[in-house]
Amino acid sequence: MIKLYFHPSANPIKVALYLEETKTPYEIVVTDTRKGDQHKPEYRAINPNGKTPSIVDGDIQVFDSTAIMLYLGEKIGQFMPCNDPKEYAKFYQWLMFMATGVAPYSGQLVHFKYYAPEKLPYAINRYDFEAWRHWQILEDHLANQPYMLNEYGILDMTLWAWARRIPFILGEDAWEKLPRVKRLHDEISAKPQAKNVEAIKTKFNFQMEIDDAARKNLFPSNERL
């Protein structure tokens, strides 16, 4: 059975959704990043980067959520394009667009808006601009098709995991400007598999508040200041 080292944030959530969608048995291993579980030596042996998620599949260990999605997609053979180089090219370009653009810009915006020790207008403006720019590209892409590719798949699961937090990331009125993204978000959120994923955080004892200790665990680079 696959072990999924999990904290209820976007990147682990997309992996859990894939496992749910494919009916793949998996075990949740609580990795509470606010309590510092990601820094423990036994976890760093699996993921030297000290982030979630990671998986252990027998004698195979994989870290980085995009690498995990590719590993699972190729192993299980579902929700990825098959035998079509053009579709594979589209799949990889959009997967990397979300991995290297949507996720980091959204994450950095959240950090500087809510958690930085001081408000830096330049940083907030830069990451707000880039986060919006990337989400708008997804919005435009969905203008003529219901999913990121021809059929529901890994790209849509990845989008959903981050889109769940759009009001927090971009502001409460953001959905008004991203109606196509919201349509896809709502469609996936209504799935029983997505509901199962959302329920994980209620089945385990994750720390939800961010106190001083949590800040040190989440943002260890600040300890250098």
Image (spheres, grey):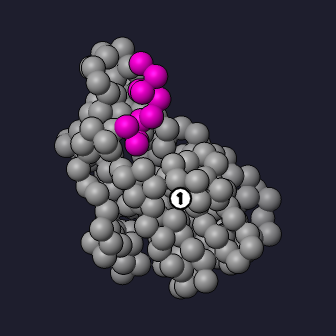
Q: Position of residue 72 (x, y in %)?
A: 66, 70
Q: Nearer the viewer, residue 72 or 92?
A: 72
Q: Which amino acid lies under the numbered mark 1 shown in the image of this protein? A: Pro
Query: What residue is shown at x 67% (from left), y 74% (from top)?
Result: 57
Whether residue 204 is situated above or below residue 184 in the rendered picture: below
Whether residue 53 is situated above or below residue 17 in the rendered picture: above
Whether residue 218 is situated above or below residue 182 in the rendered picture: above
Q: Nearer the viewer, residue 163 or 32?
A: 32
Q: Position of residue 3 (x, y in %)?
A: 57, 74
Q: From the viewer's perspective, is 198 left or right of 48?
A: left
Query: What residue is shown at x 60% (from left), y 45% (from top)?
Result: 49
The answer to whether residue 134 is magenta is no
* Range of residues picked out in magenta: 216-225
- Residue 152 visible in rendering: no
Q: For the view shown, which residue lies furthest in the left direction?
A: 172
Q: Quadrant of the C terminus?
A: top left
The answer to whether residue 223 is magenta is yes
Q: Quadrant of residue 83?
A: bottom right
Query: What residue is shown at x 58% (from left), y 53% (from top)?
Result: 41
The residue carrying mark 1 is 53
- Residue 120 visible in rendering: yes
Q: Position of residue 109 (x, y in %)?
A: 37, 32
Q: Position of residue 13 (x, y in %)?
A: 44, 63
